[in-house]
Image: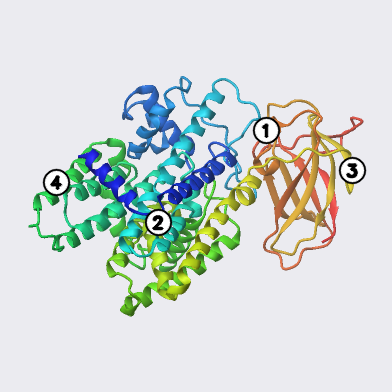
């Protein structure tokens, strides 16, 4: 049966002209995903270390996670269904993954304002089996990239079935879907978000087949297998169930010259029931997600007023989810350039205007079925996310909405199509594809690489505005600084300090900067690792000077007092004590270096 389904899929693909260019587009998407993977250090995607630990457990134990096993209990993502990790396991088996998973040393300032974007420390040289683990992570990322890139094909085929005379529209839909910034990122990391989104595209294609061709064995099996696989990958795939149900009901109304075969419907329902029954038997899944307490929490909070939710909470949640659905990198703390959100916002508004026009004005020849099939996965996933928002009283990041992305892509091009004269469409679709591809290629080099870059070594004898030679704790030397950049109240003050290591260090000493007035009152404070979190002192090379830029947040002042000064200190640990300061000649100089500044 599976061979029949795959054969039908291959025949349908060959029936469409332009297969070779489509394969080229998939190759471009795959290459871009590898660029994202190469630009972002390992562990720098949300919970990537835990997702990898899950897959590693399957490899080293040869079994699914076992409740009561201390190692399984430490895996944060243990409540996830296992399909994604099972798909990675064979590729990871040849690597030396160690006797136990060693979590990376973390940046303690990750979510503290200007504390940096990096989650982990990334030493220049890996020891032990570290290199083998790093290669295994790179291969797992490559497999994720392959899954997400290949899913352009079913999305393209779904658009071709809905608009058979407009190949350019199908190309535009595939481009919008495949090069969506958030999907590019998570689809290139070790996380199940990429695979569930790819399977959502397959579910959409199978649903289009069901709706147009009626209930046939191959279409029912394709829809059932795709939806079952998506549910076994991540539980937000439950938002796709309304799409498959609606497609089956539409398919039952099709006059195909055959009597409806109700047993096919029973087969699909039975298949999904088996999947759900197995999932409900998994303790990790049921105790975290598939539980009645979530429904109870939703009912408790799903009303305005005391004890329920505030309208402002829902609105802020929708705003947060939509923004991070477009682009949110790292551990959710790294945004794209503001132009990315602006362009996608304009595109979304135009698409909505077009969809309304297409719904009202039937002369625009937009199939109502296409609008319905595009809207159902979006609405289903969004409703599920909003329900969890309310139940948990916490905003979910936009990556939870990604299974609705195939519907978003189809809905977007349908809306834009309704606003355009037919003579413009071919050229507009080309511009859309080129624009999203170029935007996708710009992000690794303009956003991701700078966020994770370590400071450059100081070239030659670059002069300082003010050279110094103050030594903290006999190990860290402040060799100079550039004059602080003027800042308005409420903005960050930029200060450049230049450092070098006197001796090799195993410790990670934070830098503390305090902006104080003439009366000694503290105006602003920053504590962080050097290199914006990427270059802690344990990575410094001896006698290798570098300059580092710090952003000191200044808030709550209409005008800054004058004069002010900046106190520079080095701490013996996070929130620790200040290291003593000495001059180059060994004379004690207190615990701070004072830098005067007049705003």
Measure the C-alpha gap from mark 1 to mark 3: 24 Å
The residue depicted at 45 percent of the width and 55 percent of the height is: 398
User: In what element is the residue under mark 3?
Assistant: strand
Q: Nearer the viewer, mark 1 or mark 3?
A: 3
Q: Earlier in the sequence, mark 2 or mark 3?
A: 2
Q: Nearer the viewer, mark 4 or mark 3?
A: 4
In this view of the protein, which residue sits in the foreground, 427 or 504? 427
Say if mark 2 contacts mark 3, CB within 8 Å: no
In this view of the protein, which residue sits in the foreground, 349 or 362? 362
The crowding category of the residue bearing disc 4, from other C-alpha atoms within 10 Å (few below 14, some 14 to 19, many at least 20), is some
**Residue 425 in the figure: left or right of residue 128:** left
Residue 405's label in the rendered image is: 2
The crowding category of the residue bearing disc 1, from other C-alpha atoms within 10 Å (few below 14, some 14 to 19, many at least 20), is some
Say if mark 2 contacts mark 4, CB within 8 Å: no
The residue depicted at 49 percent of the width and 29 percent of the height is: 136
Q: Earlier in the sequence, mark 1 or mark 4?
A: 4
Q: Nearer the viewer, mark 2 or mark 1?
A: 2
The crowding category of the residue bearing disc 2, from other C-alpha atoms within 10 Å (few below 14, some 14 to 19, many at least 20), is many
């Amino acid at each position: 049966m599976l061979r029949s389904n795959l054969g039908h899929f291959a025949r349908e693909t060959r029936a469409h002209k332009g297969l070779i260019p489509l394969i080229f587009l998939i190759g471009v998407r795959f290459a871009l995903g590898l660029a994202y993977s190469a630009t972002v250090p390992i562990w720098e995607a949300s919970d990537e270390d835990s997702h990898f630990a899950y897959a590693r457990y399957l490899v080293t134990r040869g079994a699914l996670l076992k409740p009561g096993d201390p190692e399984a209990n430490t895996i944060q993502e243990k409540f996830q269904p296992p399909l994604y990790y099972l798909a990675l396991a064979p590729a990871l088996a040849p690597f030396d993954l160690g006797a136990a998973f060693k979590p990376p040393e973390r940046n303690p300032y990750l979510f503290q304002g200007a504390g940096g974007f990096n989650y982990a420390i990334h030493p220049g040289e890996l020891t032990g089996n570290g290199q083998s683990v790093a290669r295994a992570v790179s291969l797992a990322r490559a497999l994720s990239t392959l899954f997400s890139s290949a899913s352009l094909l079913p999305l393209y085929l779904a658009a071709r079935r809905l608009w058979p005379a407009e190949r350019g529209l199908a190309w535009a839909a595939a481009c919008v879907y495949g090069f969506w910034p958030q999907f590019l990122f998570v689809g290139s990391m070790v996380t199940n978000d990429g695979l569930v989104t790819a399977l959502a595209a397959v579910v959409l294609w199978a649903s289009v087949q069901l709706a147009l061709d009626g209930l046939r064995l191959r279409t029912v099996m394709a829809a059932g297998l795709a939806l079952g696989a998506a549910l076994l990958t991540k539980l937000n795939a439950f938002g796709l169930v309304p799409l498959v149900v609606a497609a089956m009901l539409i398919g039952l109304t099709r006059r195909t010259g055959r009597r409806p075969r109700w047993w096919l419907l029973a087969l699909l329902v039975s298949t999904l029931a088996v999947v759900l029954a197995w999932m409900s038997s998994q303790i990790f899944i049921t105790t975290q997600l598939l539980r009645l307490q979530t429904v109870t929490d939703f009912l408790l909070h799903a009303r305005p007023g005391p004890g329920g939710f505030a309208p402002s909470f829902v609105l802020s949640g929708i705003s947060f989810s939509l923004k991070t659905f477009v682009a949110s990198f790292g551990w959710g703390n790294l945004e794209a350039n503001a132009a990315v959100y602006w362009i996608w916002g304009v595109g979304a508004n135009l698409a909505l205007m077009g969809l309304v026009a297409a719904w009202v004005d039937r002369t625009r020849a937009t199939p109502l079925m296409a609008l319905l099939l595009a809207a159902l996965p979006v609405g289903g996933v969004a409703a599920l996310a909003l329900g969890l928002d309310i139940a948990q009283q916490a905003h979910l990041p936009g990556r939870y909405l990604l299974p609705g992305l195939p519907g978003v892509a189809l809905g977007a091009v349908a809306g834009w199509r309704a606003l355009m004269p037919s003579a413009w469409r071919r050229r507009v679709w080309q511009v859309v594809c080129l624009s999203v591809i170029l935007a996708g290629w710009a992000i690794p080099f303009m956003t991701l690489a700078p966020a994770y870059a370590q400071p450059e070594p100081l070239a030659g004898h670059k002069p300082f505005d003010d050279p110094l030679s103050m030594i903290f704790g006999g190990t860290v030397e402040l060799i100079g600084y550039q004059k602080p950049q003027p800042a308005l109240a409420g903005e960050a003050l930029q200060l450049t300090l230049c450092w070098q290591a006197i001796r090799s260090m195993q410790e990670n000493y934070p830098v503390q900067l305090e902006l104080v007035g003439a009366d000694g009152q503290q105006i602003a404070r920053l504590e962080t690792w050097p290199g914006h979190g990427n270059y802690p002192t344990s990575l410094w090379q001896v006698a290798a000077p570098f300059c580092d830029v710090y952003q000191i947040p200044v808030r709550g002042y209409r005008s800054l007092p004058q004069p002010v000064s900046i106190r520079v200190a080095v701490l013996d640990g996070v929130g620790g004590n200040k290291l003593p300061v000495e001059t180059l000649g060994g004379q004690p100089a207190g615990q701070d270096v004072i830098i005067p500044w007049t705003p």
